[in-house]
Image (cartoon, rainbow, N blue to C red):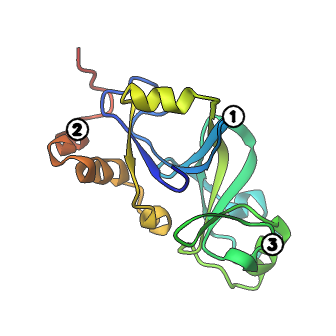
Amino acid sequence: MLGNLLIAHPLLNDGFFNRSVICVTSHTISESVGLILNFKTNYKLSDLRPELNNANFPIYEGGPVAKNQLFFLHTLGNAIQNSLAIKDNIYFGGNYNDVLHLINQGNLSQKQIRFFVGYSGWDSEQLNTELKNKNWFINSTSKIIFNNDETNLWENKLAEVKSSLKVFGTIGQDVYLS
């Protein structure tokens, strides 16, 4: 499960997670954690840290929990101390001062790191229950995390799961089927 993507079912009627694609960053017996990849905010890292050079990185809404905290996924491995390996050269977190140094030096690109405010979390067996209830599709392709094209991410990943579901991508977000 770790590093896989959760693609919201088209009929998921949860205001926050509708049309979301989430990268699972932790999955244990006591909890699961992930970051939403396709909810881009209007903010950049430079809005939060104006003293930084080269901080024109978009910030994504990672989920409804801890929205006062900044999280990040990256491909830099040991270049950022205390990073946690997720999957396929994708890492979660690490020493924030290392990140700031790399940004100030101009040694980071948007294809190497992505920032999030908040995260998505599930207690104990909550995610497993949601998976059994078919609220989510699982996709193991995590290479899209750093492509920074979130516009049609949900629709594209949904079509990969099952091509007949692609039609849901053309339906407006405010349409509910009854």
Tag of residue 30 = 1
Residue type at mark 3 is Gln
Say which label, 2 or 3, has the lower sequence index. Answer: 3
- Quadrant, the C terminus: top left
Q: Amino acid at mark 2?
A: Phe
Give the SS element for disc 1: loop
In the displayed structure image, the side of residue 134 where residue 51 appears, left or right: right
**Does residue 36 lie above or below 171 as drawn?**
below
Amino acid type, mark 1: Ser
Q: Left of 164 or right of it: where is 119?
A: right
Q: Residue at x 68, y 85 (%)?
A: 107
Q: Camera-side residue: 69 or 163?
A: 163
Could you tell me which secondary element the residue under label 3 belongs to? loop
Q: Residue furthest top?
A: 178
Examine the rendering and report whether any part of residue 16 can be seen.
no
Between circles 2 and 3, the one closer to the viewer is 3
Q: Which residue is mark 2?
A: 168
Label 2 SS = helix
Q: Mark 2 or mark 1, which is nearer to you?
A: 1
Relative image position of residue 41 (x, y in whole percent): 56, 49
Mark 3 / mark 1, whichever is N-terminal: 1
Q: Is residue 39 above or below residue 132?
A: below
Query: Alpha-carbon distance for marks 2 and 3?
Result: 42 Å
In the rendered view, tell whether residue 117 sits above or below residue 120: below
